[in-house]
Amino acid sequence: MKSKRQAKIMEIISNKNVETQEQLLAELQKAGYRSTQATISRDIKELRIIKELTSFGTYRYAVSTNEVSNTFSGRLNTIFRECITKFDYAQNILVIHTLPGLANAAASAIDTMNLSVVLGTLAGDDTVFVVMRDNNAAAAFCGEIKNLLD
């Protein structure tokens, strides 16, 4: 449950301007997750979520790009590993299948990695398309996923 909740937190802060833990808690509750402010606070710390200044002069939660390397790391690693059920690639496009409802979390984890070889991700309910810069990058990324899941 913790991994699913944390995956949902990553998805929420990637898609919405969340300024407070109370707002984050409300968004989680709308999505059907029961939690407390104390639990959210611990999740924020574990996920290395920071507050960043928006163009409107307010602060919002965001994933720290300074903490994320160009490889799988920390909680993103765990979230990504627990979401994936199968994957494959054709030329420069990866297709990643996840548990139902977790494709956005997996896509968010990939986006957060800031990989120069990833041109973009597109997530449905349980499937993620990842467009890679070239065929070799797709093969290499599939290899990384395979190593992660083994």
Image (cartoon, helix red, strand yellow):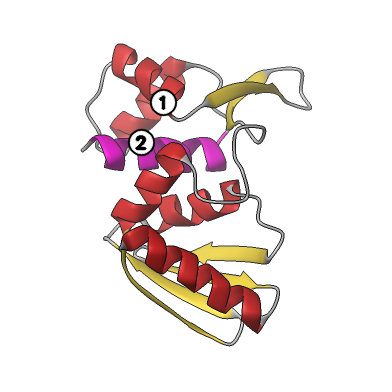
Question: As drawn, which residue projects farthest toward the top?
Answer: 38
Question: Where's the N terminus, which quadrant?
Answer: top left
| Residue receiving disc 2 | 6
Quadrant of the snapshot with the C terminus: bottom left
Asked if 57 appears above or below 115 in the picture, the reply is: above
Q: Quadrant of residue 37?
A: top left
* Residue 26: in magenta span: no
Q: Secondary structure at mark 2?
A: helix
Going by the numbered disc 1, the residue's amino acid type is Glu
Q: For this rendering, which residue is in front, 52 or 34? A: 52
Q: Secondary structure at mark 1?
A: helix
The magenta region covers 2-16
Q: Residues within 10 Å of mark 2 (few under 14, many from 20)?
A: many
Q: Tag 2: residue type?
A: Gln
Picture quadrant of residue 47: top left
Residues packed near mark 1 inside 10 Å, few (<14), some (14 to 19) or many (20 plus): few
At horizontal 41% and vertical 70% (from top left) the residue drawn is 96
| Cα distance between the residues tagged 2 and 1 | 9 Å
Q: Position of residue 117 (x, y in %)?
A: 68, 65
> Mark 1 = which residue?
46
Task: Answer with left or right where residue 139 lies relative to residue 133.
Answer: left
Question: Would you say the residues marked 2 and 1 are in contact, meaning their CB atoms lie under 8 Å apart?
Answer: yes
Which secondary structure dominates the residues rendered in magenta? helix
